[in-house]
Image (cartoon, helix red, strand yellow):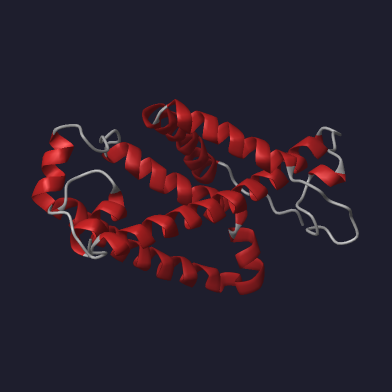
């Protein structure tokens, strides 16, 4: 058995037509909102302030460079999607063009990437929740607000808010991708409204 065997595009399309593989459940609007939601969550609310402190006005240059790179990636995905019109994203594309070994590596790389990204975003969300609760005079035990060793001088055991939000999102995804996409669309609409309609006040 060859590690570099490929699936023909014709075979993958036929299997998709027979409902033997992954089913297409998301439309263009859902995919667009998923992309926008990924950008306006970690990119705008979590990292922009940190980047602005370090880079100042040059932060806009990094946004332009990142936008250019994302545009090239989007064009590559569009080319793949038109050539291999089946579900499975980059895993299916790699299986058809590079072979089974490359698809296996890319699949596990994506699992690692999504796992690390989810952890980082959930920790950022935990910080926002703790700030919100502090505004109402509610504080969580320090031991349950961060990972071990994350806060020097404090004995921390476990980031409970981050864990709870990951479990909630996991449960939502288990219900179905269409239901998850609908909720994501609502959340993205709220985030876009916040970015466009709420002005920042100068604390000074």
Q: Residue at x 60, y 50 (%)?
A: 119
- Say how many tags the image has: 0
Which residue sits furthest front? 1
Which residue sits furthest left? 10
- From the viewer's perspective, is residue 84 above or below residue 105? above
Residue 28: x and y in percent read 27, 40
Which residue sits furthest right? 153
128 or 13, which is in the foreground?
A: 13
Residue 171: x and y in percent read 53, 30
Residue 7: x and y in percent read 17, 54
189 or 130, which is in the foreground?
A: 130
For the N terminus, the quadrant is bottom left
Q: Residue at x 19, y 32 (%)?
A: 19
Q: Residue at x 60, y 35 (%)?
A: 167
For the C terminus, the quadrant is bottom right
- From the viewer's perspective, is residue 54 above or below residue 34? below
Using residue 112 as the reference point, say whether residue 27 is left or right of it.
Answer: left
52 or 132, which is in the foreground?
A: 132
Determine the image quadrant of residue 126. top right
């Amino acid at each position: 058995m060859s590690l570099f065997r490929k699936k023909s595009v014709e075979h993958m399309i036929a299997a998709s037509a027979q409902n033997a593989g992954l089913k297409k459940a998301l439309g263009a609007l859902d995919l667009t909102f998923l992309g926008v939601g990924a950008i306006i969550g970690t990119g705008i609310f979590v990292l922009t302030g940190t980047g602005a402190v370090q880079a100042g006005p040059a932060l806009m240059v990094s946004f332009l460079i990142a936008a250019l790179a994302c545009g090239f990636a989007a064009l590559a995905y569009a080319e793949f999607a038109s050539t291999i019109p089946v579900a499975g994203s980059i895993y299916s594309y790699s299986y058809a063009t590079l072979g089974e070994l490359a698809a296996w590596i890319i699949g596990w790389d994506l699992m690692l990437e999504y796992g690390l990204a989810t952890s980082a975003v959930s920790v950022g969300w935990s910080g926002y929740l703790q700030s919100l609760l502090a505004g109402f005079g509610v504080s969580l035990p320090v031991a349950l607000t961060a990972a071990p060793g994350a806060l020097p001088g404090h004995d921390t055991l476990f980031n409970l808010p981050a864990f709870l939000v990951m479990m909630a999102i996991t449960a939502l995804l288990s219900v179905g991708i269409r239901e998850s996409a609908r909720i994501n669309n609502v959340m993205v609409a709220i985030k876009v409204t916040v970015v466009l309609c709420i002005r920042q006040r100068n604390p000074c």
